[in-house]
Image (cartoon, rainbow, N blue to C red):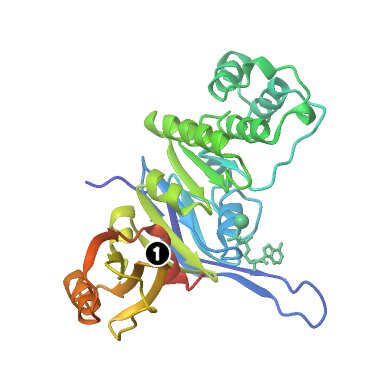
């Protein structure tokens, strides 16, 4: 028996009303369907404006869907919104706080909102987990951007939901803080929380997520285990060092790109369905060069992303 999904999205459509006279309505989601399995870290990727935040805000109950349906932990968001909301913690893309509350108060207020009795509250545990216990009595407005993000994660976990969703948690965040956030997310996941996140950092999505969906212009264009998705890359890259200065790039039909990156070094991109590394090297030699060194680079998620979305 397979586990039911943590989130089920079925033919979800969102049309935003026309922003003004003469302007068309915006179809932000054009019938998107996918499941988020329980227990993993799921990445929702896509270029700016793809519809990621719209989808997440529908799950959060902040945006009203136009058509289709979504279930969170088995609860339909339209028919059973209370239970659906109780099953999910959402860290929105925009940071919004009442500046006059302290981190401790922010968590206590949220717990009160969910009707959690004092004896069952987790404010201390959560503030310690996000390394804000020493800031518990500071005004939220005095916190750094990174501290605010961590506080938002704690706030999203106040009601102990089985699912945590983070919308662009690391946008504009420095490297050290990003590392801290990922650690926090992986820890929560290890404790059994299903995590969904959107991000622009493809390298991190590749390392962190076990499954990735990509949306583009409101349509789902991929939904696969990360390893399979990365394996879809058609292009391969090989850099060759030759024995004398290159007169210019060697361009052949079998190559998609050839670039002289150093006087004696040439980087060639080729379609793995059309040529092999051996053929590429033979072509270079046929132009009168001896090969002194070869390095190949495996395609990564970024290459697949560009291939699928056409984003440069
Ligand atoms: P992403 O999070 O992937 O960058 P969004 O979901 O924010 O994408 O936006 C998807 C599309 O919907 C964009 O074209 C955006 O301009 C449009 N959009 C988002 N919010 C609104 C809104 N409140 N009213 C009208 N259009 C919107
Ligand atoms: Mg967004």
Closer to us: 121 or 268? 268
Tell me which residue sits at (73%, 41%) in the image: 96
Closer to us: 158 or 284? 284
Characterize the local packing of mark 1: few (<14), some (14-19) or many (20 or more) Cα atoms within 10 angstroms.
some
Total numbered badges shown on the rendered structure: 1
Residue receiving disc 1: 303
Q: Position of residue 301 (x, y in %)?
A: 39, 58
Q: Position of residue 221 (x, y in %)?
A: 42, 69
Asked whether mark 1 and ligand 1 are closer than 8 Å, the reply comes as no
Q: Position of residue 145 (x, y in %)?
A: 69, 36
Q: Is residue 118 above or below residue 156?
A: above
Residue that extends furthest to the top in the rendered view of this protein: 119
Q: Quadrant of ligand 1?
A: bottom right
Is 13 on the left or on the right of 286, as rendered? right
Q: Secondary structure at mark 1?
A: helix
The answer to whether residue 66 is seen in the rendering is: yes
């Amino acid at each position: 028996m397979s586990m039911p999904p943590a989130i089920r999205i079925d033919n979800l459509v969102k049309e935003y009303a026309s922003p003004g006279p003469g302007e068309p309505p915006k179809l932000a989601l054009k019938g998107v369907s996918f499941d988020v399995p329980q227990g993993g870290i799921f990445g929702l990727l896509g270029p700016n404006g793809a519809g990621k935040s719209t989808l997440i805000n529908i799950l959060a109950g902040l945006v009203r869907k136009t058509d289709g349906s979504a279930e969170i932990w088995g609860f339909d968001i339209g028919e059973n919104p209370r239970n659906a909301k109780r099953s999910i913690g959402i860290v929105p893309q925009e940071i919004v706080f009442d500046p006059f509350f302290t981190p401790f108060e922010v968590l206590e207020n949220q717990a009160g909102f969910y009707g959690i009795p004092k004896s069952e509250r987790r404010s201390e545990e959560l503030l310690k987990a996000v390394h804000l216990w020493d800031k518990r009595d500071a005004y939220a407005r005095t916190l750094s951007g990174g501290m605010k993000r961590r506080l938002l994660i704690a706030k999203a976990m106040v009601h102990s939901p089985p699912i945590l969703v983070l919308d662009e948690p690391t946008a504009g965040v420095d490297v050290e803080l990003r590392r801290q956030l990922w650690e926090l997310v992986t820890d929560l996941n290890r404790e059994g929380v299903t995590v969904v996140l959107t991000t622009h950092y493809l390298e991190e999505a590749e390392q962190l997520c076990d499954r990735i969906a990509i949306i583009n212009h409101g349509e789902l264009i991929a939904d696969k285990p990360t390893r399979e998705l990365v394996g879809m890359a058609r292009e391969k890259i090989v850099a060759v060092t030759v024995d004398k200065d290159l007169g210019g790039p060697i361009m052949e039909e079998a190559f998609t790109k050839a670039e002289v990156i150093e006087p004696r070094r040439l980087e060639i991109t080729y379609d793995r369905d059309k040529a092999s590394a051996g053929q590429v090297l033979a072509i270079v030699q046929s132009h009168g060069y001896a090969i002194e060194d070869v390095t190949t680079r495996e395609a990564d998620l970024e290459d697949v992303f560009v291939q699928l979305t056409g984003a440069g």
